Image: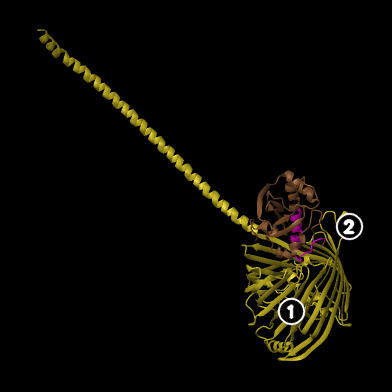
Chain colours: A yellow, B brown
Amino acid sequence: MKTVIVILSSLLILPGVCSAQETDLAAEVRELRAKLERLEKKMADEESQKMKRAEVERAAITEQVKKDVMTDVTAKGQSYFGKLIEQTKVGAYGSMRYGTSSLDELHNSFTFRRFVLTVDSNITDRLKGNLELEFERFTELEVEKRLFASRGVGLQQAIEATDHSEISLEQAWMQYDIADWLKFRAGAVLVPLGRFNINHDDNRWDLPRRSLIDRGVPVLPTTAAWPELGAGFLGDFSVGNTGKINYQFYVVNGVTLDAELEQISQTRAGDTTKFAQEVELRPSRGTFADDVKSGKALATRWAYSPWLGDELGLSFYWGRYTPDFLPNRSVLSFAVDGKKTWGNFEIEGQYVHTRWSGVRDVALGFARKAITSESEAEIGDVETEVEFELANLATSKQGYWVDFRYRFWPEFLGKTILGKHFANPQLIATLRLEQVWFNQLIKEMTFSSTSLTQFDRENRLLNRMTLGLTYRPIPLVALQLAYEYTRTNQGKSLSSVTNFLTSKDREYFQHAVLMGLAFGF
Amino acid sequence: MLKEDEAPKAVFPDADSFERKVVRSNEEIKAKIQQRMGKTTTSLWEDSYVTFIAKKGETILGYAAIVEEIGKHRPITFIVGIGPDRKIKDAALMVYREAYGGEVRDRRFLQQYKGKTLKDPLLPYRDIQNISGATMSVEAIGRGSKKALALIETVYLEGTERK
């Protein structure tokens, strides 16, 4: 009976219990679902945040990489320009002087001789470049050109320049150092004839005027500084414990007869106005453009230095000097130069001999081409004149300069303004002796209808003695004082044998006092 | 061009070992060097100096210092070997960068510095035979040699008896 009651009771209660359990379960499921949704949302938020962070990080990294790359490129750029600046050096040298002269037509004057910009670069350990650009007596050079149309087409051209202004490329070469004894150099190189041309910087010398054989006459085929376009080898090697041999050898375009055109416009009281053009053919440095002759020139110098301070050099130059329209003739120069040092006393000198072959043939060839040496015509009030001239040629010229120098510095000057600010100031007393001999120098030459009508030549002699005192506060700066006595054959003009003196017909000697400043940096 | 590891051997050929020491420069060292150089002024002060103690066995043959001085435009790097007697034993060019005046590398030029001390002028036309066209470089070698002498005295020989 009890059992029946329990069973019945269970049957009555169980559905109610089941119903309550279902309700709880559903609530639990809803709760779990809500939790899951929250979790999913949280995870999605976190993922989203993570992605955002990653994106920000990626952007930051990209930005950093950009910055790094830019920094690297900038650094490389700076290092390139830094290196370029470091390996290239700009310098200069130059000189000016004040001169007085006993010649009537020479004024006492300041002259700015030259300012030369120098640039050299060690491109690599073995590759070098060098440039020298000279501004000689240069103040101004201005060219104006205008094409216009007014009742026709016209061209107006004007040149504004100061007297004797010159811009000149003195050196421009590249050098490859294969070894100390073998270096290859190409470009505009200084011709190694004698010792002055290759050491011509003004601040290296103790007198304010360059020598006659190198500049004032010259005996060199053309005036120093004398560069030529070409290529060759140079180097040096030791001989024994103290000896050294130095050489240079080049093939170059070479000196050639080149034309200079001089135009003169002159009003003359009581006469017609004169318009004259003088075409002067004289030996000049070879062209840097296409050569006007087929032959090339050779130049070489060999110097032996038995020990420091002493040197003996031998050099020669040979090459055709006539342009192709004239007969093929050559010029041969040779030079002996040297230096000897005894303590503070030194002797330095140079002898040059130059022989121009076939000067008469060249004159005749010139006459045949030019037809007439001079022509004149008068149209209305204007007289025109055209003149052709062969200048500065002689069968041969030879000459020398020798410097005797003594360097000293009195102790008492060390306490004065001349000495107290400088480590090693110097005074240098110099005596320079010079002579030049001209053999068969063309004096007068006229031609007409392809033949020479007059061809006068003469032998001449030119002497100069210079006494100088130079003060060098530092090696690169020289203040110079010098007295010069220059003399040629009695009764002859100095201006006919020099290119820097203006003298009257019979002025055959000159006294001059020069004060010079030469500098380098 | 002479490399750093070859340089001390060039001025102390008899040495069988070299002890390398880098001396950091500071105002005190500069002042001491300048005091020893007297009126000679350097064209540049290095941040540090590479120096060597040259030995043969256990015996110190001398000291060497690598120095730099400006020639005309560029620094010339060279080594100066100095004996314990404070005299230059030898000098050798390591890097010459100037366009002209390379003759200062020659043995016949550098051997003039042997035996020179801080009391010598080390100047062209005074006690050094000049090289024409390279006077600035010749003066630079003189200044650098004095700087090396002063440095070695300051770093290694200070307090030792002057002979």
Q: Does the magenta stretch include residue B142?
A: yes
Judge whether A431 appears above or below A71 on screen: below
Q: Label 2 marks which chain's residue? A: A
| Residue at image mark 1 | A221
| Disc 1 residue type (three-letter) | Pro
Nearer-the-camera pick, A326 or A127:
A127
Q: Where is residue A169 in the image (x, y as percent from the top left)?
A: 69, 69
Residue under pointer 2: A411
Q: Which chain carries label 1?
A: A
Q: Which range of residues does the magenta coloring cover?
A: B126-146
- Residue A410 or residue A226, whichever sits in front: A410
Quarter of the image that includes the N terminus of chain A: top left
Element type at mark 1: loop
- Look at the numbered discs 2 and 1 and tell me whether their residues touch, using CB distance below 8 Å: no
Secondary structure under the numbered disc 2 in the rendered image: helix
Image coords of residue A350 (percent x, y):
79, 75
Q: Residue B13 carries which label?
A: none
Q: What residue type is labelled 2?
A: Glu
In the visual, does A181 lie left or right of A213?
left
The reply, left or right, for residue B124 in relation to residue A120 is right
Q: How many labels does the image show?
A: 2
Q: Which residue lies furthest to the front in this view?
A: B57
Q: Residue furthest top?
A: A1
